[in-house]
Image (cartoon, rainbow, N blue to C red):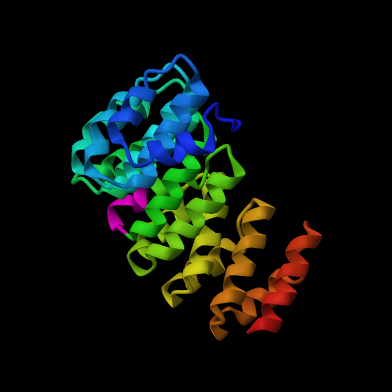
Amino acid sequence: MTKLGMTDVEVMKAKKDIAGLTSALASEDSNVRWAATKALEEIGDPAAVEPLVAALGDPNEFARRAAAEALGKLGDERAAEPLGGFLKDPNPYVRRAALESIWQIGQLDALDRVIAALKDEFPVVRQSAALILGESGDPRSIAPLIEALADADQTVRKLATKALAQIGEPAVEPLIAVLREGDWGMRWGVAKALGAIGDTRAVEPLIVALQDPEAIVREVAARALGAIGDTRALEALAIAARDDLDRQVRKTATEAKGQI
């Protein structure tokens, strides 16, 4: 017997028998239901969509997650709406699987659903949303990603920064606006994103940010200017290299001058 409660022979036979696998989805053993779901995923036949949609209602969270992942890999549009209902599943890993599968299927409202997931209460879902939005490169996600730069979770902040860098040029002006007006928790994330994008339009605003009252913002602004490499920043960095209040700002400004 395998760990999943089915012999190897039974699994091999089941993979060729969607009807048999569908019956296995009703087993009292959650391991058997999970194995049947994974087998249906491997078959890749559109006939597996309906039984997998039914499996989204499994009482076992691992089986629901497997069903959501399988539907994404099948890529059938019929699964998009049922998956949408599981973006509110009590288990965050099921919600993440449903979100990723909806994006894989690619319905028209998929981007809106991913943006909404940036507000999910559990970090793992927000992380996945930020990652997807970066891969999408869609400018409509700029504002929500900028807001995510102040997320309580460090990984979400990191992925939001990366996503904005992937979007690139369209994000520059909105980021500059926040660098001037946002709270410090967002300002440092914005400075980091601008450095990653590397657009020279950010040079002057980042020079101003070298005078920010928050040391972390000054430090990240100096690092961003070093990454951009524009000589207009040299004088301001020389002043920042003598920052009276923070040793790390002085060190980063000196290194940034060296980069330029």
Nearer the observer, 152 or 35: 35
Residue 112, position in %: x, y? 27, 41
Which of the image's four quarters has the N terminus?
top right
Residue 185, position in %: x, y? 56, 45
> What span is colored magenta in the figure?
138-143
Quadrant in the picture for residue 110? top left
Q: How many marks?
A: 0
- In the figure, 55 relative to 118: above or below? above
Q: Is residue 25 left or right of residue 159?
A: left
Can residue 120 be seen here?
no
Residue 157, position in %: x, y? 54, 48
Nearer the observer, 184 or 81: 81
Nearer the observer, 92 or 175: 92
Quadrant in the picture for residue 96? top left
Residue 83, position in %: x, y? 30, 32
Query: What residue lies at 40% left-to-right and 33% top-to-bottom?
Result: 37
Query: What residue lies at 69% left-to-right and 54% top-to-bottom?
Result: 215
Which of the image's four quarters has the C terminus?
bottom right
Q: Is residue 7 left or right of residue 175?
A: right
Query: What residue lies at 48% left-to-right and 74% top-to-bottom?
Result: 198
Question: Would you say the magenta stretch is mainly helix, strand or loop?
Answer: helix
Q: Residue furthest right?
A: 247
Can residue 219 be seen here?
yes
Nearer the observer, 88 or 32: 32
